[in-house]
């Protein structure tokens, strides 16, 4: 697909033959998209991005500079990956005892989630829809939808609207001051849009 002009690949980047890249996607300097990967429409991959074999990336995903998205990672639509954030795919790697793809553990980043610069996402967890992972966080458990997490290990420190505005709850409800969307608390680790 390298000759297909529906998308842009900088001349310093490589795309293997067996990849799918959606319309209006841009892949910038010194990046590599490996075999079997699928990248949706209107995505932006910054400088020095690696997309490993068989990775699935949705539409309108923004991946900033110096990010490696390894095999086993799935990024749904509208995901944001900040500069130098890190994904893993093996909980106990050993150079002398490689497991290969059968030993990789899946990580799912759901629609609209954002990951801050230099955050580390340990494999095997799910980041919920519109979750927000702060810069430098180390994620070692599932992150609920709309949760704001940061720290090492990352913990919930609040809630965020789909539009990116911090939510303030009174009793069990919150209304976004920016867009008007409404939310309710289900429990201490879960909210939903109403």
Image (cartoon, grey):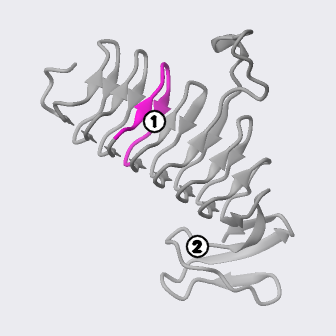
Residue lying at the far front of the rendered structure: 96
The Cα–Cα distance between marks 2 and 1, rounded to whole angstroms, is 23 Å
Quarter residue 151 falls in: bottom right
Rendering coords of residue 6 (x, y %): 16, 33
The magenta-colored residue range is: 48-60
Q: Which mark is first along the chain, 1 or 2?
A: 1
How crowded is the residue under tag 1: few (<14 C-alpha within 10 Å), some, or many (20+)? many
Rendering coords of residue 73 (x, y %): 58, 32
Q: Which mark is in front, 2 or 1?
A: 1
Quarter residue 153 falls in: bottom right
* Above or below: residue 69 compared with residue 121: above
Apparent side of residue 36 relative to residue 69 in the rendered image (left or right): left
Rendering coords of residue 21 (x, y %): 30, 29
Between residues 82 and 19, which one lies in front from this camera angle? 82
Cβ–Cβ under 8 Å for marks 2 and 1: no
For the point 49% across and 51% down, the residue is: 81
Residue receiving disc 1: 57
Is the C terminus in the top left, top right, bottom left or bottom right quadrant?
A: bottom right
For the point 46% across and 53% down, the residue is: 83
For the point 71% across and 64% down, the residue is: 149
Residue receiving disc 2: 161
Instruction: Please identify the dominant SS of the magenta region.
Output: loop
Residue lying at the far right of the rendered structure: 187
Apparent side of residue 107 relative to residue 61 in the rendered image (left or right): right
Between residues 98 and 59, which one lies in front from this camera angle? 98
How crowded is the residue under tag 2: few (<14 C-alpha within 10 Å), some, or many (20+)? many
Q: Dot 1: what SS?
A: strand
Whether the magenta-drawn stretch holds residue 49 is answered as yes
Between residues 176 and 86, which one lies in front from this camera angle? 86
Count the marks: how many? 2
For the point 77% across and 58% down, the residue is: 152
């Amino acid at each position: 697909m390298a000759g297909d002009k529906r998308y842009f690949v900088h001349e310093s980047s490589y795309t293997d033959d067996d990849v799918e890249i959606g319309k209006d996607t841009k892949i910038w300097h010194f990046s590599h998209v490996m075999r079997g990967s699928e990248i949706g429409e209107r995505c932006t991959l910054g400088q020095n991005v690696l997309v490993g074999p068989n990775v699935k990336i949705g539409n309108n995903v923004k991946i900033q500079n110096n990010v490696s998205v390894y095999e086993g990672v799935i990024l749904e639509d509208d995901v944001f990956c900040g500069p130098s954030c890190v994904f893993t795919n093996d909980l106990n790697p050993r150079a002398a005892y490689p497991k290969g793809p059968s030993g990789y553990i899946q990580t799912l980043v759901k629609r609209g989630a954002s990951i801050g610069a230099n955050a580390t996402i340990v494999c095997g967890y799910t980041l919920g829809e519109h979750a927000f992972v702060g810069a430098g966080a180390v994620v070692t458990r599932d992150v609920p939808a709309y949760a704001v997490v940061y720290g090492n290990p990352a913990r919930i420190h609040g809630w965020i609207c789909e539009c990116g505005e911090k939510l303030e709850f009174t009793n069990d409800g919150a209304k976004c001051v920016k867009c008007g969307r409404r939310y309710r608390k289900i429990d201490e680790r879960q909210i939903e849009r109403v």
